[in-house]
Amino acid sequence: MHLSRIIGLLLGPLLFIGINCLPEMISGNPGANAVIATALWMITWWITEAVSISVTALLPLLLFPLLGVMPLADVGANYGSPIIFLFFGGFVLALALEKVNLHKRIALTIINLTGTTPEKVVLGFMIATATLSMWISNTASTVVMLPIAMSVINLLIKDEDGFTAKDRNFALSVMLGIAFSANAGGIATVIGTPPNSVLIGLLENEYNIQISFLRWMTIGLPFSLVMIGISYLVLVKWMFPCKGLSFGASRGVIREELRKLGPASRHEKMVLVIFGVTVFLWIFRTLINELIPGLGLTDTAISMFGAIALFTFPYNLKRGEFILQWGDTSRLAWGILILFGGGLALARGMSASGLVDLVSTAIASSEISILFTAVLLITLMLFMTELMSNVALVAVLAPVVAGIAIGLEIPMLYLLIPVTIASSCAFMLPMATPPNAIVFASGYIRVHQMARAGFILNVISIALLVFLFQFIIPLLF
């Protein structure tokens, strides 16, 4: 075991014991010490990854009832929150797309449509990756795209002039483009990346504020598109230009990959129909509820409809075969669902112990500038997420940011949305996100190359998010 993990494994419980031995931090509320101690234990284990981040998320379930913060039933309710079932349904949809290989067909079709000049190929890979990342995990979308990209790059390695500087630039642009668009693509939808769901769960659980699937897309999709466009320009036009590079065989590779898939199977068509209906219901839920009073359709209910349909619509009725079998869920990211629950439980503990009120009161009594606070929080979140899990980070910081917004007397969504989006803008380091790590492992990228391009995109992300905070979010929310 790495030394940092051993230190973290011991330091977490020691901090927990030490904080609980201190005098009350909030007079009349001994639960505050217990919540702070638990939060520090969780943060220590999350940062050092001493144990699985999902196991760490179970600590409130054990510690809060023992220390009198909340009864077990109240803590456990957070692990069964509706938002967790929204994400569960999203996971099941993604599982079905992957099982029937529909995600690969979608990706190849998009790349085939964008063209075969080097710059268009890069753009095709980025659009395809981002489109997939809106609906399936960014890890899965990157894993799908990587072998296709490697096939195209191999054409350049084997051509007459060998692997030239322009070829290397193309390889870098494709690989970094896949990673960056996988990160940015998930921002577009509620189910695209876990931090979005953590935020929406916090808002529903603690403040009774609901953000629908469509309402999130009004801010998430434009930001995602702008970031992908900027990433493309930074990579292809500035950092790693490959203008003048010509190769005609790439379309052949893409078409060959499509040919291998064959015509769309009945399985694929059924998944596509269920997926399409689910997305349609998500987008037009509000309108449907207005047309049918009393229906009370929710994003979670729609998500569960999609999931249950995939398990119950028969593919072959005689044989009793369905699109998905329960055994397929062995590949489901159950740990992420527990992580959501742990984050929501920690947020509830912070609220119940008076910590959020304490933060808001402290901010209200200070003369800190609202804009400066927003810039600071966005920058802090964005660069911290380069080093630790963005889900864990949002789980810890979102309740605090809500308290800061209350103290500043501004709607909490104005701060919480850009700060949460910032957690998905980790472009600099290979260990920051799974897509970064996967493309780094291809061997075509060095750390300094990713860090140089990533730092520029991080700074641009901060500027865009501050612009959102100041001008766009107040109009939409």
Image (tube, rainbow, N blue to C red):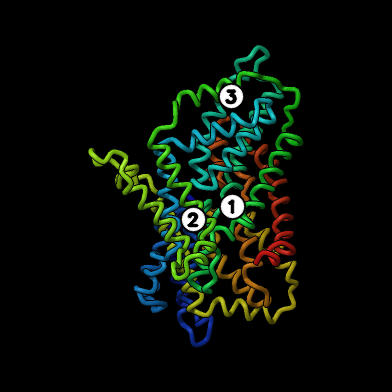
The front one of 181 and 257 is 257
Q: Amino acid at mark 2?
A: Leu
Task: Identify residue for label 2.
Answer: 281
- N-term mark: 3 or 1: 3
For mark 3, give the secondary structure: helix
Residue 114, numbered circle: none
Task: Identify residue for label 1.
Answer: 187
Q: Amino acid at mark 3?
A: Val
Which quadrant, please, contains the C terminus?
bottom right
- N-term mark: 2 or 1: 1
Task: Identify residue for label 3.
Answer: 152
Give the residue at x 57% y 20%: 252
Dot 2 alpha-carbon crowd within 10 angstroms: few under 14, some 14 to 19, many 20 or more? many
The front one of 75 and 192 is 192
Residue 393: image location, x then y, percent: 55, 59
The front one of 24 and 151 is 151
Residue 119: image location, x then y, percent: 69, 30
Q: Amino acid at mark 1?
A: Ile
Find residue 238 and report its image quarter: top right
Residue 198 lies, with reference to residue 148, above or below; the image says below
Total labels: the figure holds: 3
- Measured in 3D between alpha carbons, the distance from the residue under mark 2 to the one under mark 3, in whole angstroms, is 38 Å
Please say whether residue 426 is visible from this viewpoint: yes
The front one of 109 and 453 is 109
Find residue 394 and report its image quarter: bottom right
Dot 1 alpha-carbon crowd within 10 angstroms: few under 14, some 14 to 19, many 20 or more? many
Residue 379: image location, x then y, percent: 68, 58
For mark 1, give the secondary structure: helix
Give the residue at x 67% y 37%: 449
The furthest residue to the bottom: 28
